[in-house]
Image (cartoon, rainbow, N blue to C red):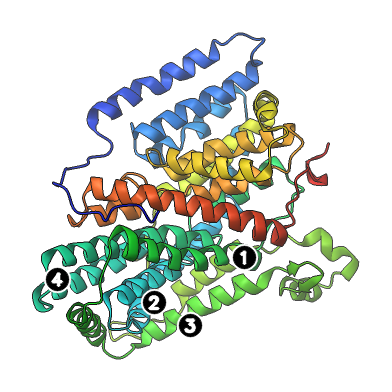
Amino acid sequence: MSEAAPLEEPRPGPFVPGTRRWQRMGLGLGPLLFALILLLPEHWLDTQQRRAAAVTAWTAVWWITEALPVGIASLLPAVLFPLLGVLPAGEVAPLYMSDLVLLFLGAFIVALGLERWGVHRRMALSVLSLAGPQPRTQILAFMVAAAGLSFWINNTATTLLMLPIALAVLDRVAKDSGAHPTQVRRMGFALLLGVAWSASVGGMGSPVGTAPNQLYLGQMNTLFPEAPTPGFAQWMLAWAPMVLLWVPLAWWLLTRVLFPLPKLVGVGAAGRAAIASERAAQGRMTAPQKRMGAVFACTALLWVTRADVSFGEFELHGWWRLVMRLRGLPPEQWSQHTRDVSDATVAVSMALLCFLIPSGSRQGGRLMDWQHARRMPWEVLLLLGAGFALARGFRVSGLDQALGQALGPLLEGRSTWVLVGVTALAVSFLTEITSNTATTAVLLPVVGEAAAAAGLDPRLVMVPTALAASAAFMLPVATPPNAVVFSSGRVSTAVMARAGLWMNLLTVALLTIVFQLWVRRVWGIGAEMPAFGGP
């Protein structure tokens, strides 16, 4: 990496994802591929397997080409599985409002409450105010704030929040610092890309940080119902270190290698002045902000303390045991009820509280109302439901086992380091041109059953698949945060692609190391197929 030349901005070029020609092609290609798969020979796949594969292919093509809005295309399994006899309608429909979908719904409502009252902006500015006098440390503060917020708030919302603050800093620097325009451009590249990429990686740190995390939990539960499910605290214990390591490494790569920034007192002073001005404009904390902040703090605390947290022989009991005691269940029966109360219970409860608690503002009203709740990203919820439906279709039709047996030999005898690294690298670059959530939904059942057929723990490939889907940094279409900073007009596609290539490689390498040396130990992931995958 040290040999990479500093990047300068080339001539800007427009990037328009989802062109009409591409959409029209996908509109016809989806049903055509559906029909061709149904006509495959019987000795390749049986009838039910062909039907499940055909529905998956049609859905995937419409997702990738955006022939229809992603949320609408996600309804295809709800229609086609019952018509083809893969799954009854009564089994498909609940998957679109499953426990994990409700978790995301409740989390989105709490996040929308934070956005409505500006709590997230106040939190971000509090972190940014700690930045030092140098532009490099200010960029680090932006990255820390973006990554931290993305643990709890949708990464797109985080980037949209941070972008105006970052642009205000850059405008103040360009106007008042007296720095050379080249230095200002470099700072702009590092700052804007750092914000977008930190928002994406920050989502790895918690189950609600990004949709692929939820797809992993849901599809793991569908494909391997007896597998242990990591709770909120167990997830953060495993993946927060990844975020904590990535931020300083990515910051070093951005500010020392890709966009070298010398010590510039004038630039740093102008940046601090812009941050101070933004924070001063916030004024004192209002009653709605205090109440919404309290709801958010309670939500996070209840999530983290709900389930038992174990690490080796150490175990910290969660409050779900208190619920069992209050229900009058004898302790010997508690192990049968570990999933009675879930993180979705917390999320929906706190979402309801947002609609009940008075805001305390002069205008009256509650912390949340339906006018603001309608901004919910419904397409994400529908896409999650479609992912769970496809996984169930794979399982019921036997397509998962058929594909697993076909692909399993490719995984046999491979080093776990090679498996994890190659899987993460492939998914990282694949999601540069496809939706990370859609890609994860299609790949998880395939790689999971392939690993099981090879006698391996399916988590060895399923976890890297889900997490690497958030490690796409090269193109605006790869992730919404990339698209948001690209829309500012300050970063061209070429600059993003050249810098993003190095960031892809860094993130995949770090993900592989953290997974192998830390996550496997925390989650108890071995090399061979565990008991939950048996007959």
Q: Nearer the viewer, residue 311 or 373?
A: 311
Going from the N terminus, do you reach mark 1 or mark 3 first? Answer: 1
Q: Which mark is residue 294?
A: 3
The amino acid at mark 2 is Arg
Q: Which mark is residue 232?
A: 1
Instruction: Look at mark 4 in the image and give the residue it sits on.
Output: 171
For discs 4 and 3, the disc positioned in front in the rendered view: 4
Q: Residues within 10 Å of mark 1 (few under 14, many from 20)?
A: many
Q: Quadrant of residue 95?
A: top right
For discs 2 and 3, the disc positioned in front in the rendered view: 3
Q: Which mark is residue 366?
A: 2
Q: Are marks 4 and 2 in contact (CB under 8 Å)?
A: no
Q: Residue at x 18, y 57 (%)?
A: 490
Q: Nearer the viewer, residue 445 or 242?
A: 242
Going from the N terminus, do you reach mark 4 or mark 3 first? Answer: 4
The amino acid at mark 3 is Ala
